[in-house]
Amino acid sequence: MSSARAANTWRSHCPGLGISADALFSRAARLPRVDIRKPLKVIGTNTVDHLQIGLYYGYIGLVDGILERMIAELGLDTRIVATGGLARLIAGGSKYIRQVDELLTLTGLRLIYERNLDRAAERPHKSRRE
């Protein structure tokens, strides 16, 4: 998330949807593992429906709740970018996410690597005997 008012980037980190689902399934032995996907309806008729509804809409509520507070602090011109493996799924249900970049972290790591390569090329190399 960034704002046109400043050159800074603000972030919020929370447990990912996949990790949250894994924790739920591993701690509640009687619950079946379910696919993480957008449910067909908000009111389910069985355990699988209820789990998918809770995971999907619960996580969107978490994300939108944080974004709403950040937008209140930063202004309506705030640019929001979702990243991560399930970002596109969550963005589809979010009131605020308009841009998804699933490779943002990898792109950042590549840029850091390339900058360090340039710096390493500029430094004189010392031989091991020195």
Image (cartoon, helix red, strand yellow):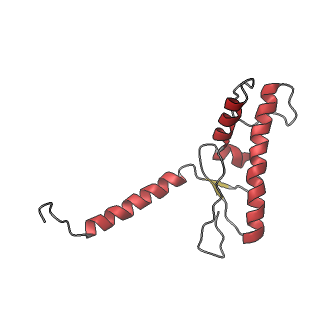
* Image quadrant assignment for residue 47: top right
Can residue 35 be seen by looking at this rendering? no
Can residue 59 be seen by looking at this rendering? yes
Residue 60 appears at what percent x and percent y?
75, 47
Q: Is residue 19 above or below residue 111?
A: above
Q: Is residue 93 above or below residue 2?
A: above
Residue 43 appears at what percent x and percent y?
88, 34
* Image quadrant assignment for residue 29: top right
Residue 3 appears at what percent x and percent y?
66, 70
Q: Is residue 45 above or below residue 103?
A: above
Q: Image check: 113 left or right of 93?
A: left
Looking at the image, which is closer to me, 26 or 86?
26
The residue sitting at the left extreme is 129
Looking at the image, which is closer to me, 96 or 21?
21
Query: Which image quarter is the N terminus in?
Result: bottom right
Residue at 79% in and 49% down: 61
Residue 36 appears at what percent x and percent y?
69, 34
Residue at 70% in and 49% down: 91
Residue at 67% in and 42% down: 17
The residue sitting at the bottom extreme is 5
Q: Image check: 8 left or right of 113?
A: right
